[in-house]
Amino acid sequence: MVKHFDHLTIVVRDIDQAKAFFSALGFAEAISVVISGEPFASYMGVPNIEAEHVTLVLENASPRTEIQLLRYHHPAPLPDPHIRDLNKLGMNHICFAVDDIGAEVARLRARGFRTRNEVMDFHSRKLVFVEGPEGVTVELSQWH
């Protein structure tokens, strides 16, 4: 039986920008290593893999919540021309609950990150989509 969410991994070209984005949401770098060769190539299904693997941990969260970043040295990462399109098949977006959506949006905008829309009210919460690293959609949700 599933116990709880553990982590999400995002492949990025600019690891510093991705770390800055998640830092603005309260994540801190826990570990950074380079993964290469076996057993990673077999496990990931990526022959000759070599990638920087950074684990970011949401501070003071219980249970532990991680975002893992991969920056491939080899092979070259494959672009997803539809990553921003929320009507594509597959992974759509990730959502984080927040205490004060207005404060979070202001903090992100002050650091140069953009929202995709204005805050809306839906199903007993305020919601907003944020443009995350590599076009990944990150949603913030404040329950009321």
Image: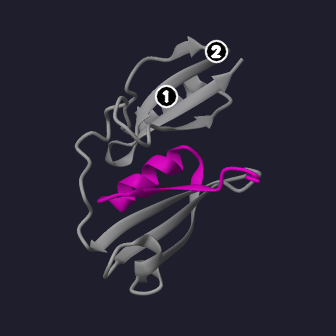
- The local secondary structure at tag 1 comes to helix
| Residue that carries the numbered disc 2 in the rendered image | 123
Q: Residue 52: percent from the left, percent from the top?
A: 40, 73
Q: Residue 16: percent from the left, percent from the top?
A: 38, 59
| Residue that carries the numbered disc 1 in the rendered image | 106
* Amino acid identity at mark 1: Ala
Near mark 2 (Cα within 10 A), the count class, few <14, some 14-19 or many ≥20, is few
- Position of residue 10 relative to residue 137, above or below, is below
* Amino acid identity at mark 2: His
Distance (Cα) linking label 2 and label 1: 23 Å
Q: Earlier in the sequence, mark 2 or mark 1?
A: 1
Of residue 106 and residue 59, the one placed in the foreground of this image is: 59
Near mark 1 (Cα within 10 A), the count class, few <14, some 14-19 or many ≥20, is some
Find residue 134 and name its label: none
Name which residue lies at 31% across and 32% down.
85
Q: Quadrant of the C terminus?
A: top right
Residue 131 in magenta stretch:
no
Q: Give the residues drawn in magenta, as a range.
A: 1-27
- Position of residue 69 relative to residue 3, above or below, is below
Instruction: Residue 14: name its quadrant.
Output: bottom left
- The local secondary structure at tag 2 comes to loop
Q: Quadrant of the N terminus?
A: bottom right
Name which residue lies at 41% across and 65% down.
70
Q: Residue 122: percent from the left, percent from the top?
A: 58, 13
| CB-based contact (under 8 Å), mark 2 and mark 1 | no
Left or right of residue 13: residue 133: right
Of residue 97 and residue 93, the one placed in the foreground of this image is: 93
Which of the two discs, 2 and 1, sits closer to the camera?
Answer: 2
Left or right of residue 88: residue 144: right
Q: Residue 84: percent from the left, percent from the top?
A: 32, 36
